Structures are given as C-alpha cells and as structure tokens.
Amino acid sequence: MKIGDKVQFLSEIGGGKIAGFQGKDIALVEDEDGFQIPTPISDLVVTSSGEEYSSSRSVVKKGGAEQASETADPDTFNMSVKAKINATIDDEFIEEEEYDAADREITYRAKVEERKGGNVLNLYYAFVPEDVKNFSKSTFACYLVNDSNYYVHYLYMSVDGHSFRLRGEGELEPNTKLYIESFALDQLNEIDRVRFQLLSFKRDKDFVAKPVCDVQFRIDKVKFYKLHTFQSNDFFETPALLYPVVKNDEVAQLKPIEAEKLIYVESDETETKSKKDVQSNVSYSKLKGLESLNTPKHAKSKKSSNEPLVVDLHANELLETTAGMGTSDILNYQLDYFRRTLEENKHNKGLHIVFIHGKGEGVLRHAIINELRYRYKNYPYQDASFQEYGYGATQVTIR
C-alpha cells in the first residue's frame, strides 16, 4: 500500500486514495471532497493504483459538458467490501436441492393377470375377528373382497335415517381384498345399515360392461356374538363373516353366509313324564347345514307329519355369548329367529311348531303373541302341552 493507491473501507461504505501515513498502522485516506480520513491500514483494501478514484462515479468531460457515468454495479455500489465478499460467498454456497430417483412418481402399471372365470363380477363385504381366542372382546376388521377380473371403484357409506356418512372410497384391483376399517362390538350401531355404490371396468382393453350397482342393506349385529357364524373361506386364513354384495353379476340377496342354523327337533323320547322331569330332561338334536327348514332333508328327519317342530328361543341356545348385548338386542334377535322360522315353513301346511320361550317375566311370550295377532293372523296358536314343554311354550299351526 503506497501513496496514490485507491482504497475502499472494509467496515463501512466509501473509500478514496492514500494521501499519506501516520506511523506504521494509520493511513490518511482522501475522499472525493478532499477530506483526509485517518484509517487503520487493516480496515482498507486496495482497489487500484491508477487514475483518480471515485466511490460513486467518474466524471467524463465530453463536448465541454460533464456527463456522469456509473462505474459500479447499482446493486452493490452502496455495500461495504466485507458485505460484498460475504454476498459472493453466499452465492457460491447455495445448496442445490437434492434429487432422489425414488421420489419420482411411478407411472408404470404391471399388466393384470386375469384368472379363468373371473369375468363374472363377485364382491363381498367381509368381517374378520382380530382376536379369535378372545372372541367376546375381539375387534373386527372390515374388508372389501373383489373376486373378479374387474377394477371396482367403490363408495362405502353408513346410513342414518335419510342421511349418509362416507366411511371409505377408492378402487379395488382385480382379485384382491382391501382393508377398510376396524371396530369394536360397542361400535356396531355405526354400521347398522350400510350402502355401497360400485362401478366396475377394465383398463387398456375391451370388456363387457357391468351395471352400476347401488346397494343398501342392514347388518345383523347379533351375528358378531356367535363364533360359528364366522366360517373358513378362500379369502382369509382365519374364519370370516361374508356378505355377498354382488354375486355372479347380480346384486345378491344380502344375507350373511351362515355356518349353521340352530334348529331343534324332539328327541326319540315320547314317554309321558311329569312337568318337572320333562322340563329338565327333554333333549334336542341339532340339525346342521345351510338348508332351509322345509328342505327334503329336514322332512326326512321327522317320523310323521304330525310330529311338531320344536324351536328353543332361549338366548343361551341361540347365542354363544351375550356379552355387550342389551336386553332389547337379545329380544330383537329372538323375534327375528321366530319370524324366520315361520317364513321358512309357511309352505308346510298343517305343521305344528312349538316355540319354547320360558316363563320368566313373560316379555318374550307377549312379544310373540303380539306378532301372531298382527303379523301372522292366519296362524292359530295355543299354549303347548305343559306336560311335555312346561308352561313356557307356545304352539303355532301353519295354515
């Protein structure tokens, strides 16, 4: 650094030229107004050693007139040298955004492998207990099962009166199952009635169009208290309760696939016994299977056409557990079983059906009598033989 060098201040705006020195560490910097500013040499940087320095502009005489021409970058002119250096460093070290190929959107779709017989639409609404060993306290996983070669776009809703709540929507790929939600027994009322809207199609190929489906039905909540209604199946490794929503391209009859129906007939004992002995010793044989009550198989199980069909409506006979059920839930299930028995035997003219309801407080008996008076007016009824069934049974005759 010598006299005449052009310098700029490091710690502040401005500069000038070296006019002299005061000792070894102080330089006299003369600005463009002629003032000499004592400045530590360490706070100066030499910019050039040539012509006259101007911190803002150089004056060029042209045609006898003074014309100002800017000699500095307008964005950095009023910045100190230190600030300029820092700005340069910041520009050099701006990090580029990292790029990961794994973040790219996947647009490739593998070709769907179709199976033979899969061009018929079959869709199931499935429930799987998540803790079979502790069934009475288990939660249940809810699935949609697409057993076809079609994509299915679905809307899944719960129904409350005339309003609906969307519980799920999406797309089912061909021949797959999709988890929707889980719920506990005390949440069953939320899906008491459900509705599905379904649109099926195939991608990248011609296909036979299927009807758009709009299906609404009621869930039988009592089924979730009976372990045997959950059956082995082709879709899950554990037993499941399946509701067919679409079966062979048609909206299915929306009844769950039952494991067995609990229907009881009299045993071979026909001896007349006292009221107390008969009530405690009458035994019943269980007819298993999915056949309706009036199938040939059931008819063969009778000794004669005069032998009555006996149905025990006690809750402990119909249900494996009543945990989590209120008295109204149990009563509704017993009445539903009563109605179903009459409906399935309505063509068996002359058949006598004995419904064992017990004496107790008479709630179930009064409910049955009310059904017979108003819904099944054509069916005569009477108290069943108290010697055989005690005082807690009613006999109905199919007409």
Image (cartoon, helix red, strand yellow):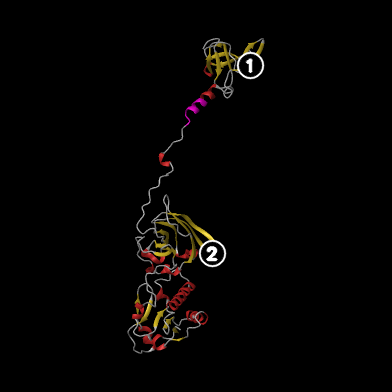
Residue 150 marker: none
Residue 186 pos. (x, y %): 47, 65
> In the rendered view, would you say 51 is above or below 330?
above
Residue drawn at (51%, 23%), measured in percent from left and top? 85
Mark 1 and 2 residues: CB-CB less than 8 Å, in contact? no
| Magenta range | 86-94
- Say which of 150 and 231 sits in front: 150
Residue drawn at (44%, 64%), measured in percent from left and top? 250
**Mark with earlier residue (1, 2):** 1
Residue 25 pos. (x, y %): 52, 14
Based on the displayed image, in which of its 4 quarters is residue 72 positioned?
Answer: top right
> In the rendered view, would you say 27 is above or below 385?
above
Residue 68 marker: 1
Residue to which mark 2 is pinned = 160
Based on the displayed image, in which of its 4 quarters is residue 101 positioned?
Answer: top left
Residue 327 falls inside the magenta stretch: no
- Say which of 86 and 192 sits in front: 192
Residue 80 pos. (x, y %): 56, 22
- Say which of 19 and 287 sits in front: 287
Residue 207 pos. (x, y %): 42, 54
